[in-house]
Each structure stands twice: as structure tokens, then as C-alpha cells.
Amino acid sequence: MRQSLEQFFSLAKKSKSQMLSLRMKIRIQAALFFLFVLVFPIQSAEKDFQIIDLVVGKGEEAFSGSYVTVHYVGKLPNGTKFDSSRDRNRPFEFNLGAGEVVKGWDKGIKGMRVGGKRKLIIPPELGYGSKKVGNIPADSTLIFEVELLKIY
């Protein structure tokens, strides 16, 4: 009987030390992963893409497949206005998520509610990329203030 108890406690000590060793390995691996991410950050358009809610709407929520009506003002980072549905007094309509607009709009308007206003800061990769469009230079970050008016 005495030998059985000694064996039991011996196994329990080994299991406990193995668990501590496993926990330590997991902590070390997690620390190394975060260190790697800090030293070698992932460069992507997602990092530079920003959605800033100026007014949170109370109406219906927009999702991919929604047909939406918006008012917008588009500017370059230096403040130069390049387009505005407000100046034309004519809202813009499109099918959200269908690729009818720049990718940054499809991503940035999804989840908005009717009555909401957002500022979208769109890096070139989610905007017009390396091509010049109208008076918008190639590789431009785009800044839009968008108001969601209707969802059909």
C-alpha cells in the first residue's frame, strides 16, 4: 500500500511539472509570436482603411446586396474636393457589395444604418489604386463623408 501511494504522488508531481512546462512553452510561443508581429508588421490596405462614425443612424442596416442611396463628399488628404453628390443636389444610388463602387465604399458602408454619417479613409488599394481617375492622382488616399439616406 505504501508503495502505491509513493507511485501515485510521484506521478502527480511529474504531471504537475509537465503541465507547468507546457504552460511555459505556450507563454514563450505567444510572446515570440507577438514580438514577430511587432518587428515584422503585416503591410496591408486594411491597416490604413478607417471608418469613423460621425452620426450613428437609427434606421435599417445596410448589408451586401442592399440597394442604397447616399449623399457623399469626396476629398483628397490635402483637402481638395474632387466630387460631391451634395453639390449636384443629387444622391447616388448603387448595389452594395456588387463592385459598382470602390472597394472601400463596399466595406465602409456595410453595417451603416439609415440616417448615419461616416467618414471613410480609403487607401489606394481599396480606392482607385495606381491609376489616375479624373482629377484624382494615382495612388491617392481618398476621404469620403457619406450619409446613408435610404435602403431599398
Image: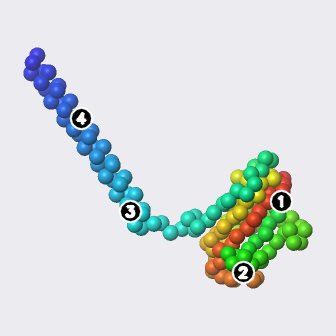
What residue did someone put label 3 on?
36
Q: Are marks 4 and 3 in contact (CB under 8 Å)?
A: no
Query: Gap in Å between the C-alphas at discs 3 and 1?
Result: 44 Å
33 displayed left or right of 140: left
Q: Earlier in the sequence, mark 1 or mark 2?
A: 1
Residue placed most toward the observer, 90 or 94: 90
Pointer 4 or 3: first along the chain: 4
Residue 2 percent location from the top left of the image: 9, 18
**Residue contact between numbered discs 3 and 2, judged by CB atoms under 8 Å:** no
For the view shown, which residue lies furthest in the right direction? 89
Which label number is shown at residue 136? 2
Query: Closer to the observer: label 1 or label 2?
Result: 2
Going from the N terminus, do you reach mark 1 or mark 4 first? 4
Considering the numbered disc 3 on the image, is that residue within a helix, a strand or a loop?
Answer: helix
Q: Which residue does the numbered mark 1 point to in the structure image?
A: 69
Would residue 97 be seen by someone viewing this image from the given angle? no
What residue lies at 80% left-to-right and 47% top-to-bottom?
Answer: 59
State the image quarter where residue 104 is shown: bottom right
Q: Is residue 6 left or right of residue 94?
A: left
Is mark 1 in CB contact (under 8 Å) with mark 4?
A: no
Disc 4: CA contacts within 10 A as few (<14), some (14-19) or many (>=20):
few
- Of the image marks 3 and 2, the number of the one nearer the N terminus: 3
Q: Amino acid at mark 2?
A: Ile
Q: What residue is shown with label 4?
A: 16
Distance between the alpha carbons at the discs numbered 3 and 2: 37 Å
Residue nearest the viewer, comparing 94 with 85: 85
Label 1, secondary structure: give it.
strand
Quarter of the image with the N terminus is top left
- Colour scheme of this structure image? rainbow
